[in-house]
């Protein structure tokens, strides 16, 4: 366990150094306003936990190949086999290490990476457009049952501006249009609408209702509204589940967010598979090979897994394929290869 964890940590540090450098180079050419070199460095540093979460499967594979390969080269694994440890028991020991990595990856991807990634992107947006509030704000559309809301200005701090409300009947016929000059949500998740004006379409007439203050109750709270402004990979698993539930409840397309959720779960579980796969390799030709050969094998398999996962995730969104199947397919292939490789060891 110590060998695999130390080697994985070293590989992850190297990968993050490269990824951080590329991230910094990409951002330094896009400075604007107060978003200058110090904040570019801060943005890059805040992005590192999310990048670590994305790279951990590859780091776990390369680290396990290097660590276990070193043990095999020194005949330590052979001594373990000779002392009576079966391949199954060795695999179980390595799987325990994989489970530790899985837990660390889950914590990183749920509680550390997404909030820091959101803060970094929000900081960059505010720094770049702090002198241009029109570009800083975002318009958004949300649906709550038979009501469709259009908020004309939603800042990253969830300060609402004017709002349009379209209310539909059971036959999808427009029943009312309303506008409020200002809007917000109180502590009880009630919508407060200032200078409210609603036009009601009745059978043979139009009725207008005006009020300086109106209170509406929607199932959309500040959390759901805030999620509409956040990229899927900046959301935690709990937020993804909540937003997917909201989208399905309102008959909206949730494929993009389901893809991200299943992709994240599959990536986390794959971290546990990688050390076992590495064990299967070190029993073969890599037992006497150098660290360069192990590194090359790890890079090739890791890149193949990453590219396959990204390609399947994107194609699933384009062709509306089942996101769960596509997300688990690369992991299932790796697990199958691992089982076959271990079963051939004598």
Image: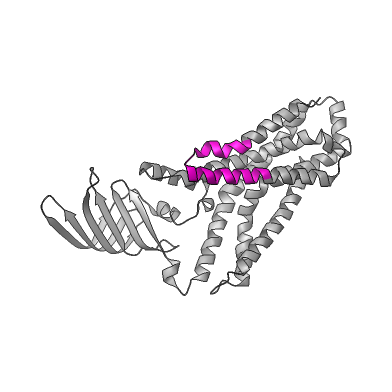
What percent of the width, then of the height, locates residue 190? 32, 54
Q: Position of residue 140 (x, y in %)?
A: 38, 58
- Give the percent coordinates (x, y) of residue 241: 47, 43
Q: Residue 323: x and y, percent?
A: 51, 40
The residue that appears at 65% across and 64% down in the rendered structure is 24
Which residue occupies the extreme front position in the image?
A: 319
Quarter of the image for the C terminus: give it.
Answer: top right
Q: Quadrant of the N terminus?
A: top right
- Locate residue 257 relative to residue 302 in the image: left or right: left
Query: Does any portion of residue 3 appear in the rendered image?
Result: no
Q: How many marks?
A: 0
Q: Is residue 1 visible?
A: yes
Please identify the dominant SS of the magenta region: helix
Residue positioned most to the left: 204
Q: Was residue 305 drawn as part of the magenta stretch in this picture? A: yes
Q: Is residue 87 magenta?
A: no
The way the protein has been coloured in the rendering is: one colour
In the drawing, does residue 193 fall left or right of residue 346? Answer: left
Tell me which residue sits at (54%, 55%) in the image: 115
Q: Nearer the viewer, residue 131 or 184?
A: 131
Which residue: 21% across, 54% down?
176
Viewer-side residue, 77 vs 176: 176
Q: Which quadrant of the view contains residue 304? A: top right
- Which residues make up the magenta segment? 304-331
Task: Judge from the rendering whether residue 220 lies leftward or rightward of residue 308; answer left or right.
Answer: left
């Amino acid at each position: 366990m110590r060998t695999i964890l130390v080697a994985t940590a070293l590989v992850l540090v190297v990968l993050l150094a490269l990824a951080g450098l590329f991230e910094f180079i990409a951002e330094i050419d896009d400075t604007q306003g107060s978003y200058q070199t110090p904040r570019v460095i801060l943005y890059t540093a805040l992005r590192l936990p999310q990048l670590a979460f994305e790279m951990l499967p590859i780091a776990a594979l390369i680290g396990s190949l290097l660590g276990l390969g070193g043990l095999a080269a020194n005949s330590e694994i052979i001594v373990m086999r000779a002392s009576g440890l079966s391949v199954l028991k060795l695999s179980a020991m390595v799987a325990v290490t994989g489970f530790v990595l899985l837990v660390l990856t889950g914590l990183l991807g749920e509680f550390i990476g997404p909030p820091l990634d959101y803060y970094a992107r929000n900081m960059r947006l505010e720094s770049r457009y702090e002198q241009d509030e029109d570009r800083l704000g975002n318009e958004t559309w949300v649906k709550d049952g038979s009501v469709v809301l259009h908020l004309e200005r939603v800042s990253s701090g969830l300060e609402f501006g004017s709002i349009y409300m379209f209310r539909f009947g059971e036959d999808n016929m427009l029943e009312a249009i309303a506008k409020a000059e200002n809007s917000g949500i109180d502590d009880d998740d009630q919508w407060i609408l200032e200078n409210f004006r609603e036009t009601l379409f009745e059978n043979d007439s139009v009725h207008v209702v005006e009020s300086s203050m109106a209170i509406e109750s929607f199932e959309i709270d500040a959390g759901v509204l805030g999620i509409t402004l956040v990229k899927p990979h900046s959301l935690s698993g709990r937020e993804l589940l909540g937003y997917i539930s909201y989208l399905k409840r309102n008959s909206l397309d949730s494929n993009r967010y389901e893809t991200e959720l299943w992709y994240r779960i599959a990536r986390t579980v794959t971290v546990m598979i990688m050390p076992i796969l590495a064990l299967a390799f070190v029993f073969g030709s890599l037992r006497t090979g150098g660290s360069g050969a192990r590194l090359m094998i790890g890079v090739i398999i890791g890149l193949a897994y990453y590219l396959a996962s990204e390609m399947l995730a994107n194609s699933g969104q384009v062709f509306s394929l089942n996101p769960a199947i596509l997300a688990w397919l690369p992991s299932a292939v790796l697990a199958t290869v691992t089982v076959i490789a271990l079963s051939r060891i004598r």
